Image (cartoon, helix red, strand yellow):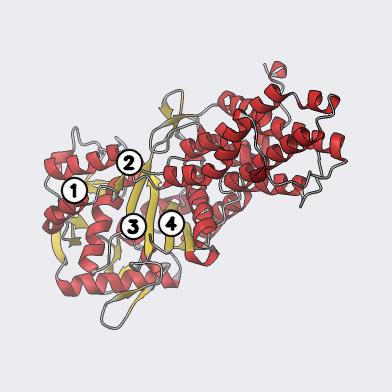
Amino acid sequence: MKKKYYITTPIYYVNASPHIGHSYTNIAADVLARYNRQGLGEGNVWFLTGTDEHGQKIQKAADEAGLSAQEFVNKVSGRFRDLWERLGIKYDDFIRTTEERHEKTVRRVLEILYAKGDIYQARYEGWYCTPCETFWPQTQITEQLCPDCKRPLERISETNYFFKLKKYQEWLQGHIEKNPEFVLPATRRNEVLGFLKNNQLEDLCISRPKERLSWGIPLPFSPQHVTYVWFDALINYISAVGEFDANGKYISKWWDNDTKVVHLMGKDILRHHAVYWPIMLECLGIRQPDTIFAHGWWLIDQAKMSKSLGNVVNPLDMANKYGIDTYRYFLLRDAVFGNDGNFSEEAIIKRFNGDLANDLGNLIYRTLTMVEKYYQGAVPGIEIDKINFDLSGEAIKNKIKALSGEITAEFNQGFGFAFEQALEKIWELIAMANKYVEETKPWNLAKENKTEELKAFIRLLVEVIRKVSQEVAPFMPATSALIKEQLGADIIKKGQPLFPRIDTSKKS
């Protein structure tokens, strides 16, 4: 068991405002960070996010906005920070690729790899996609269209610098085959292995001439070139948490053998992370991350969200309309993490009225109402471990004890991060408790003066709610805090229902 945990999101490209996909990755990373802080302690978890601020698309967007590139990235980077604060994202560091600490590390990486002979100069003639800022070999293109964005390619001839990817292809394939948790989920691992087995890697063009693109980090050995945005961007994972010594050795407390290193991202940027990045680390003599996890997309009517289709969902709109924790809960409960999900407001409302209002909210409200009614707000001071309940009560007591272990199993089973399954385990306990209320009919216990049975019953329900509050905290931090506030130490402070039902009859 590793003692520390380092979790990263991609650094988001600031040519446009944040959308639901960005929020999905960051909410997932936030849950993992919060969950691991509970187990490892606050000081042993580091959560990094940030923004990617160089490249042709940034310069173009800045020009269109009538701003300098630096003014433009400052403005858009701030929108990401604001969104994360609004969504309750508790990151430890926010890196920007225009910061000196990052640019210094990128220059050092380039110097080390150039000195080793893993970067070389060559004349390039071929097809280039400006929107993707990517060169494409003839073997991967048809009809002179970009394989990724399907827009027209342009023919370019220029002198550039190249990073030796193909030299390390066999090593990379072997590393992925020997380490089944390195690329997850398994479908993505198979995808990367299939690509490596069926294609010869081309060396990566890592520079652009300054005359064509000035907005980037200059190469230390060729000031007339700037660094390719993807080569620059990937280095953020190490530039944020360490540095190279005079001998070119990388030193970091968050990238040592005591730390579990996890990269989260959307599936569209998996190849950059599972091919370019591991080879870069290998060449630098730096250990590999433990897991590179690529999640799926959120679709609308089975189509990917895009500005051109006009179907992009603004995370703030959803959080403002339904609540931050509802939005967080929906994203992590309604789709298997790793697969695509289908987004709709109807689906959010269904989760809200079912899981949150009927199940969790109802259990809390009815329990606290009974504490008020029967005990003037003071929770009965008995220990449930000393009580022999009926079969249903004992099953609930055992579930309370087992729940933490069940959630840990979903996060550490070696096949990814089963958020939806972890939440399902919590809701199993909620369902058992709600069913127990219907079976036991506590109002009858009160009528029949079965005072000890009623005390034990109420105390068991309170312990269920305490456990749910604890385990739901990484997913729904504000809700967890509200539950703890309502329960108090042992004097309840019942407020309004946490999740008042949404009246769908008023919706057109």
Report which residue position mark 1 lands on: 177
Q: Position of residue 343 (x, y in %)?
A: 50, 29
- The residues tagged by marks 2 and 3 sit, at their Cα atoms, a distance apart of 26 Å
Question: Which residue is pictured at 16% across the width and 45% down the height?
Answer: 196
Report which residue position mark 4 lands on: 7
Residue type pointed to by label 1: Glu
Circles 4, 2 touching at the beta carbon (< 8 Å):
no
Mark 3 element type:
helix
- N-terminal of the two: label 3 or label 4? 4
Observer-nearest of 309 and 455 = 455
Of the numbered discs in the image, which one, if any, rests on residue 473? none
Report which residue position mark 2 lands on: 185
Q: Is residue 479 above or below residue 248?
A: above
Observer-nearest of 428 and 360 = 428
- N-terminal of the two: label 4 or label 2? 4
Is there any visible trace of residue 113 in the rendered image? yes
